[in-house]
Amino acid sequence: MSTQHGGGNRKPSTKPVAGAKPKQGGDEDVSDVEDVELLEDADVSDSEVDSDISDSDDEGGPAAPAKPKASPRKSAPARKTTAGAGKRPATATRPAAKKIAPVKVKQGMSWGPIALFTTVGVLALGIVGFAGYQVYENGLTWKERADQISGIQDYYKIDKAMVGQREHVWGPQQYKLSPPVAGNHNANWQRCLGDVYTAPIANEHALHSMEHGAVWITYNPSLPADQVEKLAKRVRGNDYMLMSPYTNLDKPISLQAWGFQLKVDNADDSRIDQFIKALRQNASLEAGTPCSSGDIITETGTTPRDLGKDGTTQMGGN
């Protein structure tokens, strides 16, 4: 009596196949492609194995031995792969970095460059202004420049008839102004080669010097010595300049050129230099006639010296 086998309930043997090499460490490190191929060759479903065993038993033949399983090395579970295995995954796109606005640091105002540029600007304007003034001034006549001096008296405009009087006469003369700026005068002139007289001189001689283009500086005898010296420094060594004290002045200092007069209170007054610059040699009725030759007077005193009146001295003819 044959024994009935229930082929459907038989399970494949889990014993290792004889001759199979035991699993060793490191054997599992195979490529993904090799694992997949081996698995496809050795992967047999349980239904197929059971079907084979059942057919063999039904035929009454001996039971077919179970199909040996793949070695542990070859039957290692396959690694999961995704579609497109073997291709290098695309690099993930990083989100665009958010731009960080620069931090504005409020700094204090730098005054150094501002002060420098301001100074340079002021100097530039000063240079341009001075150059423009020079061009303007050079375009003026000497009379126009003189008239620009504050406080000056222009007797060409005030008393033109007086300015026109210029005869050579002997003896003392009477003048409308004190000190005089024009009128008949002595034939001898006071030397005006930068002379500083420490005593009064005659109007009649000084006027003749002014007719040659000299500037005559007079001062009140009570003027302090330091003020007198400041005036003297403007005279010494300068041709067509002379200076002397003058009594009964209504101002501390009075400057005269032919037809012009300026009175000031202090020797530091800048108008003194303006007067000299504008009128020395310009306010001349005998341009080019020197102050250092001819019938000159170097003596002091308010009474004129009529040299040549008696024929004992040569007349200058000027």
Image (cartoon, rainbow, N blue to C red):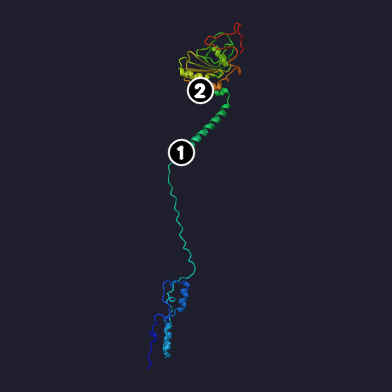
The residue tagged 1 is: 112
**Which of the 4 image quadrants contains residue 55?**
bottom left
Relative to 181, does residue 9 appear above or below in the rendering? below
The residue sitting at the top extreme is 310
* Mark 1 residue crowding within 10 angstroms, few (<14) / some (14–19) / many (20+): few
In the rendered structure, are the residues bearing label 2 and label 1 in contact, judged by CB atoms less than 8 Å apart? no
Q: Which quadrant is the C terminus positioned in?
A: top right
Image location (x, y in percent) of residue 261: 52, 18
- The foreground one among 305 and 166 is 305
Q: Which mark is residue 271?
A: 2
| Comparing labels 2 and 1, the label whose residue is closer to the camera | 1
**In whole angstroms, how far apart are the C-alphas of marks 2 and 1?**
38 Å
Q: Which residue is at 53% across, 12% downward?
A: 203
Image location (x, y in percent) of residue 187: 59, 11
Residue 263, visible in the rendered structure = no
Image location (x, y in percent) of residue 277: 55, 22
* Mark 2 residue crowding within 10 angstroms, few (<14) / some (14–19) / many (20+): some
Task: Please tell me how many numbered marks the rendered image carries.
Answer: 2
Q: Which mark is residue 309?
A: none
- Give the SS element for disc 1: helix
Amino acid tagged 2: Arg
- The foreground one among 65 and 7 is 65
> Which comes before the other along the chain, label 2 or label 1?
1
Relative to 109, does residue 5 appear above or below in the rendering? below
**Which of the 4 image quadrants contains residue 17?**
bottom left
Q: Which quadrant is the N terminus positioned in?
A: bottom left
Amino acid tagged 1: Gly
Image location (x, y in percent) of residue 304: 55, 9
Q: Which residue is at 43% across, 85% downward?
A: 52
Residue 34, visible in the rendered structure = yes
Relative to 242, does residue 85 appear above or below in the rendering? below
Q: Which residue is at 56% across, 21% downward?
A: 279
